[in-house]
Image (cartoon, rainbow, N blue to C red):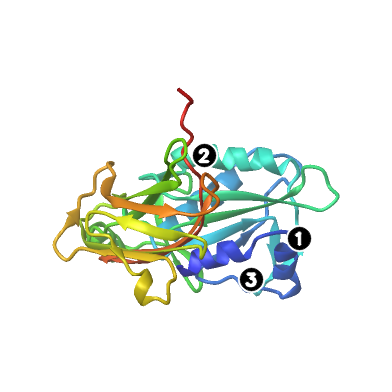
Amino acid sequence: MDQSTAIFNSIADLDSIKRLVADRTQENVYLELKTKKDRSRPDLDESDAWQFSRALSGFANSDGGVLVWGIETDKEERASVLKPISSVADFEARLKKSLLNAVQPFVDGVQIVVILEEGAAGDGYVKVLVPRSEKTPHRAMRADREYFRRSTEGFYRMEHFDLEDGFGRRPHPALVFVATLVPRRDDDPHEDVHLALLNQGRGLAKYPGFTLAFSPDVSVVATSHGINNNSSINNGRPIVSYQDNIAVIHAVPVQSSIGTVTIKRSSKGAPLQISVRWYCEGMSERTYSGLVSPEVHEAR
């Protein structure tokens, strides 16, 4: 998990927001704290739009980061006072809408989440995850149409040599792991887990691979197309893996099928717990741990 995602996930609830102030958390290269200009209205005024556009550009052009709305900082840029926003869900909706024109090119993978204040209907805070982008440089269209980067001192306008570096940055792949759970029909106790990779970056994804672990109640019955069943060499823990030292996945909006893992468990048709790590040349390892819901077939 990268640093910005770890920070974003750590700010999970209202207690996390309060803890930022209690701990006098310092803004840093991955964290920016902001107050809304007029907290009583959800509208995105020019000042808010400027700040949001700059943050999208600066974090995306750097190593990613998290913007938290609703916390005031002191002169040392430490979290000092909670400033919850009224009608925060409407403010969130306006932020999401402004993504389309806040920066060019569009920043992929931005997440915007509301955290509600306790006992105040509709008031709260907003956390925004801005991933590191492979489509740099991004221009802040509502922040003087400048290009920004993030440093330990905050956001700064990119100089000419920064832009040369940004425009010349080598295109990188960005693999997305796709798992589809398909229970077999009728009395067949087996389920098929179809696995695929999608390259959302701009560079070739060379030598892709992954390791996929299932919950202990799963038995791996069969694998296909070069997927290896590693359960027997991992003390019976249901694990499969895949690696290809020849293949590449092109940067096109089409999933590349890897193969299928056939499994058996007592809870056929229930969501499937998985933990997966996937990688390729030119991309840091990515991880996911969670549930995969089954596809629902219409009765015939």
Tell whether label 1 touches label 2 (CB within 8 Å): no
Q: Nearer the viewer, mark 1 or mark 3?
A: 1
Where's residue 198, x and y in %?
31, 49
Q: CA distance from mark 2 to mark 3?
A: 26 Å
At x 57%, y 58%, the residue is 67
Q: In the rendered structure, which amino acid carries the disc numbered 1?
A: Leu
Q: CA distance from mark 2 to mark 1?
A: 24 Å
Q: Residues within 10 Å of mark 1 (few under 14, many from 20)?
A: some
**Pointer 1 residue:** 82
Q: Residues within 10 Å of mark 2 (few under 14, many from 20)?
A: some
Q: In the rendered structure, which amino acid carries the disc numbered 2?
A: Ser
Q: Which mark is residue 98?
A: 2
Q: Residue furthest top?
A: 300
Of the numbered discs 1 and 3, the one sitting upstream in the chain is 3
Local SS, label 2: helix
Where's residue 32, x and y in %?
57, 63
Where's residue 278, x and y in %?
35, 63
Where's residue 130, x and y in %?
48, 56
Is 277 displayed left or right of 94 in the figure?
Answer: left
Of the numbered discs 2 and 3, the one sitting upstream in the chain is 3
Residue 200, placed above or below residue 209: above
**Pointer 3 residue:** 77
Q: Residues within 10 Å of mark 3 (few under 14, many from 20)?
A: some
